[in-house]
Image (cartoon, rainbow, N blue to C red):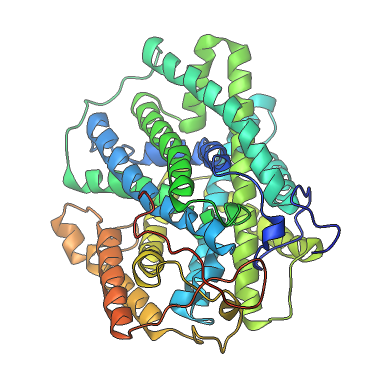
């Protein structure tokens, strides 16, 4: 270990490589603060608002859909988180075991696009709050928030953990007061259309949008657990992650749906109206909390984009390594591109964000199914970490089982898809409802399990203490909650 590398580092030196045990630190409860703070932000409120934006679903049924989507999406997301301490790897490096050294690059492209899309939605909403607070033009607000987010991402793992912990207390208090005000203080809202009832298509959308909002963390959730000691139990990582992101997701999406039903003008304007019920001083604190929440989650999105982009590039240019200079070389272009997308998003945010979420879900659900089936059911946590960095290692250049299952899982979704650009035959029968992500996950996961069991793999174990040798390590139970 370099003498400048310490577990309490301020500026992270590592990137996509294995984290040796001498740098491991922290406790699983830290993850609750990271994911609670990261999820208490405006894009989550906007995701909830999209569930009733069509005007075809009642608030009550939207709440049911949100709860189902959050439960399912968080279950999958937290199961990925549990892999972090055990393997000490970024999530997308670990996926080379399922898709092959080069094959893993294909889902990586979708992951990078996903980060950019989440970032763009967040920076627009945060800029709206900054404009409301300071009067700064929206375009200038987008740039200011992008710069702040990039700075936090440049410092890396420890600063992100610390920032999210302190932010959790502030945003929880602000949203608690907002929720009370929403429930108890009458507001002079414009006359609303009659409350709709139940329609299958909008209800299925109300399940899908929360699911991808939660599952969107999956490709980098293990990255924020990879510095935890290898002895950390899978169950503790799973449940602390689940509690943090699950509670915050359900809370803010239900709040977002409620605001959308009662107010016009978008989530930021609605929140400002509600906060004003307690006085201008509280509205100012609320806007400040919203701004901090946005640039904190966008720091995670830039950091995740950096990690995924570096994984993608080093797949083909293996001499590139981590460090501050390389982080700067990745983060700055990623931030610039994401900021540009924010300008494209700003004129039609909710409709664009809904379409983006549905498309991302179709791309990510087969990936998440293959990854989790491999970790919990096929290899049961036993991997050769060194081989993940070698194109000629035991995982191969391209895994036919992994890539085949992913592509079949994606293809079978087409009849079930419904988005702004395309509606499948089955989706039309379901009143426009989109269940493609469920079908894709089930088919790809089942197919991968069958193909891998037929290969009769002899599992290998995870590397210990940064040694290049392969030694045995504890096998996780098939259920992270066990």
Residue positioned 60% across, 73% down in the render:
312
Q: Nearer the viewer, residue 229 or 62?
A: 229
Query: Which quadrant would residue 134 be assigned to in this image?
Result: top right
Give the answer, above or below, for where 226 lies relative to 170. Answer: below
- Please indicate, yes or no, whether residue 127 appears anywhere in the rendered image: no
Residue furthest bottom as drawn:
392
Residue 228 in picture, x, y percent from top left = 60, 52
Quadrant (top left/top right/bottom left/bottom right) for the N terminus:
bottom right
Give the answer, above or below, for where 362 lies relative to 39. Answer: below
100 on left or right of 359: right
Residue 374 in picture, x, y percent from top left = 39, 70
Mark count: 0
Residue positioned 35% across, 81% down in the render:
404
- Please indicate, yes or no, whether residue 407 appears anywhere in the rendered image: yes
Residue 93 in picture, x, y percent from top left = 56, 70
Query: Which quadrant would residue 71 be assigned to in this image?
Result: top left
448 on left or right of 123: left
Q: Nearer the viewer, residue 446 or 214?
A: 446
Give the answer, above or below, for where 419 lies relative to 108. Answer: above
Give the answer, above or below, for where 375 lies relative to 105. Answer: above
Residue furthest right as drawn:
3
Residue positioned 53% across, 14% down in the render:
276
365 on left or right of 127: left
Residue positioned 48% across, 38% down in the render:
244
Q: Nearer the viewer, residue 404 or 446?
A: 446
Residue 368 in picture, x, y percent from top left = 40, 63
């Amino acid at each position: 270990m370099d003498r400048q590398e310490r577990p309490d580092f301020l500026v992270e030196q590592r990137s996509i490589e294995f984290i040796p045990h001498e740098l491991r630190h922290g406790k699983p409860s830290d993850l609750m603060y990271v994911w609670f703070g990261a999820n208490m932000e405006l894009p989550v409120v906007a995701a909830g608002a999209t569930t009733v934006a069509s005007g075809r679903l009642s608030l009550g049924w939207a709440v049911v859909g949100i709860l189902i989507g959050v439960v399912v999406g968080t279950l999958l997301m937290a199961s990925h988180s549990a892999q972090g301490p055990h393997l000490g790897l970024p999530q997308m490096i670990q996926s080379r075991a399922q898709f092959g050294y080069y094959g893993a690059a294909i889902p990586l492209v979708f992951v990078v696009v996903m980060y950019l899309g989440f970032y763009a939605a967040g920076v627009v909403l945060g800029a709206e709050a900054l404009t409301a607070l300071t009067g700064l033009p929206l375009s200038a607000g987008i740039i200011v928030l992008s710069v702040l987010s990039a700075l936090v991402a440049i410092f890396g793992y420890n600063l992100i953990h610390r920032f999210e912990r302190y932010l959790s207390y502030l945003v929880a208090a602000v949203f608690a007061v907002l929720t009370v005000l929403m429930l108890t203080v009458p507001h002079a809202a414009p006359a609303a259309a009659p409350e709709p009832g139940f329609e299958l298509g909008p209800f299925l959308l109300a399940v899908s949008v929360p699911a991808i909002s939660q599952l969107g963390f999956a490709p980098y959730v293990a990255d924020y657990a990879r510095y935890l000691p290898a002895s950390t139990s899978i169950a503790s990582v799973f449940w602390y992650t689940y509690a943090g992101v699950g509670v915050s997701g359900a809370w803010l999406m239900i709040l977002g749906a409620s605001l959308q039903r009662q107010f016009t003008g978008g989530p930021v304007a609605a929140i400002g109206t509600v906060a004003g019920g307690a006085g201008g001083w509280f509205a100012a604190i609320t806007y400040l909390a919203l701004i901090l929440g946005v640039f904190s989650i966008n720091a995670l999105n830039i950091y995740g984009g950096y990690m995924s982009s570096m994984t993608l590039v080093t797949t083909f240019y293996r001499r590139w390594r981590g460090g501050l200079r390389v982080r700067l070389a990745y983060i700055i272009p990623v931030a610039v591109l994401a900021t540009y997308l924010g300008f494209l998003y700003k004129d039609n945010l909710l409709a664009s964000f809904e379409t983006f979420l549905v498309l991302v879900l179709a791309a990510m659900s087969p990936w998440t199914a293959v990854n989790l089936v491999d970790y919990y059911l096929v290899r049961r946590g036993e991997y050769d970490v060194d081989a993940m960095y070698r194109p000629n290692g035991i995982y191969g250049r391209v895994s036919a089982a992994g890539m085949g299952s992913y592509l079949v899982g994606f293809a079978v979704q087409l009849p079930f898809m419904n988005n702004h650009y395309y509606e499948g035959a089955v989706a039309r029968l379901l009143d426009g409802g989109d269940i493609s992500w469920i079908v894709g996950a089930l088919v790809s996961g089942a197919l991968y399990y069958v193909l891998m069991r037929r290969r009769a793999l002899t599992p290998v174990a995870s590397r210990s203490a940064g040694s290049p040798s392969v030694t045995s390590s504890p096998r996780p139970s098939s259920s992270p909650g066990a």
